[in-house]
Every structure is written in C-alpha cells, then in structure tokens.
Image (cartoon, rainbow, N blue to C red):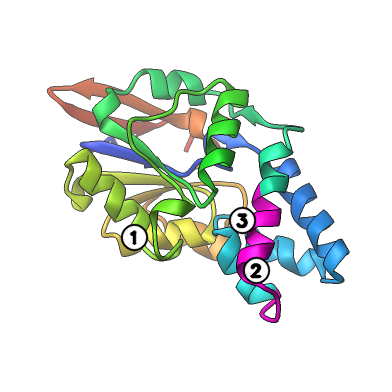
C-alpha cells in the first residue's frame, strides 16, 4: 500500500552508501592496536557515533582522543565505498527541500563518502558534530525535520541499523528498514521493510511524496 509523506530522512552508511567493509576495517585495526575484542566492537558499531561506541567498549580510554584517531582513519579510508543500486536515481527524483541525511559519522567522513559514491550532498545534512546525543536518541532526526520545516509525523526515516531504526521511531516518524545490519527483531518492529533502497519508489505529486515498495 502506498504511503504519503512530506520528507524522506535517510541514514547514510548502509542505506545510500555501502561503506561496511571500510568501516569494519578501520574499527578492527583500531581494536587490535588497543588490545580490544574486535568482533564485539563490530557487533555494536553500526549506526552509532564513534564517541558512544568508544565509551561503551573502552570506558577507560580518553574518548575524545580516540574518536579523533578513528575519524582520521575513516576520513582516509576509501576502499570499497560505493552507492547502493538505485540510490542516485532515487535522490535525483526528490525535491531538494524534501529530503535530508542524518548520519552518525563525522562531517568530513560523510562528505568523503558522498563524493566517492557520486551522490549529492543535501541541503540538510545532520552529522555527529551537530547533535549532543547520537542514535538511538531521536535528536538528529528531529533536527532534520525542523531544518526542513516539516512536522516529524510527516517524515519517513530510511534506516538499516538498530540504533537508527530506534531513533526514527522515537522521533515519532514512520520508519522504512533496509535489510543489512539490523537484527531480525528490530526489522520486524519497523513500519515498512525493503531489501535495499532501490526498492523504494517515490512519486512527487502536489508537494507530497507518495512512496511504494517494489518487491518489499
């Protein structure tokens, strides 16, 4: 059944840009140099700000210093980054005032990945630097809606990670879950589910977005 909204709010990594290999390589390298359990870190890193992950997995560390190291590593890691099939055409079909990106990544990392993937930078880009509390807090999504001038209830979030799906729901927005890093339980709690972003189809009519899910 088609869904109507006024704005789409996208997560970046895992939704529009496939950066999983690079992200996991950076975190594994960092974990090994700190004597930490890399597998445990990978299990909690997706969809969250680096600062929150560091505080959870290495509470004894200087979080600010470690985040600076991680962000520098991510800003230099370009291997494997590409857009997901259908992402570019989907964004091109949207009015500039009807979409935003809300990412847990640093500004430099977000701009790097968008550029490498050949995707446009939106007028509203909310990064880790713009919020006091990262996902699963709804702060980033609420900020994006406010900057677009759209009520939260009129926004639809597109997310792939547990923390992001929870953030969209907590913001009072409907959530499209993209299969990827989220657990089966989290996917089941989303309002809609698709295998990849290319299955999300949008028709613009009378200033509203009409969403349908091909093969979802």
Give the residue at mark 2. 54
**Dot 1: element:** helix
Residue under label 3, please give it: 46
How far apart, in angstroms, are the residues tagged by discs 1 and 3? 18 Å
The answer to whether residue 117 is magenta is no
Residue 67 disc label: none
Q: Earlier in the sequence, mark 2 or mark 1?
A: 2
Q: How many marks?
A: 3
Mark 3: few, some, or many residues within 10 Å (few <14, many ≥20)?
A: many
Mark 1 vs mark 3, foreground winner is 1
Q: Of helix, strand and loop, which one carries label 2? A: helix
Disc 3 or disc 2, which is closer to the eye? 2
In this view of the protein, can residue 195 be seen by the observer?
A: no
What is the C-alpha distance between the residues marked 2 and 1? Answer: 20 Å
Which residue range is magenta in the image? 58-71
Residue 59, quarter of picture: bottom right
Q: Is residue 79 visible?
A: yes
The reply, left or right, for residue 133 in relation to residue 46 is left
Residue behind mark 1: 139
Q: Residue at x 55, y 59 (%)?
A: 48
Q: Circle 3 sits in a helix, a strand or a loop, which is it? A: loop
**Residue 128's spot in the image, x, y percent?**
48, 53
Q: Quadrant of residue 7?
A: top left
Q: Could you say which is closer to the camera, residue 69 or residue 155?
A: 69
């Amino acid at each position: 059944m088609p869904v109507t909204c006024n704005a789409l709010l996208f997560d970046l990594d895992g939704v529009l840009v496939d950066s999983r290999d690079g992200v996991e390589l950076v975190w594994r390298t960092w974990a090994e140099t700190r004597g930490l359990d890399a597998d445990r870190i990978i299990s909690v890193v997706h969809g969250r700000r680096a600062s929150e992950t560091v505080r959870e997995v290495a509470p004894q560390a200087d979080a600010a210093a470690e985040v600076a190291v991680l962000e520098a590593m991510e800003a230099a890691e370009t291997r494997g980054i590409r857009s997901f099939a259908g992402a570019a055409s989907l964004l091109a079909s949207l009015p500039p005032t009807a979409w935003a990106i809300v990412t847990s990544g640093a500004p430099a990392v977000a701009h790097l990945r968008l550029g490498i993937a050949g995707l446009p930078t939106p007028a509203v880009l909310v990064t880790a630097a713009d919020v006091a509390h990262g996902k699963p807090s709804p702060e980033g999504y609420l900020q994006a809606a406010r900057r677009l001038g759209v009520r939260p209830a009129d926004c639809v979030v597109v997310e792939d990670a547990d923390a992001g799906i929870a953030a969209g729901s907590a913001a009072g927005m409907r959530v499209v879950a993209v299969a990827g890093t989220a657990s089966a339980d989290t996917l089941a709690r989303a309002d809609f589910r698709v295998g990849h972003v290319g299955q999300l189809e949008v028709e613009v009519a009378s200033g509203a977005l009409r969403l349908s899910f091909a093969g979802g």
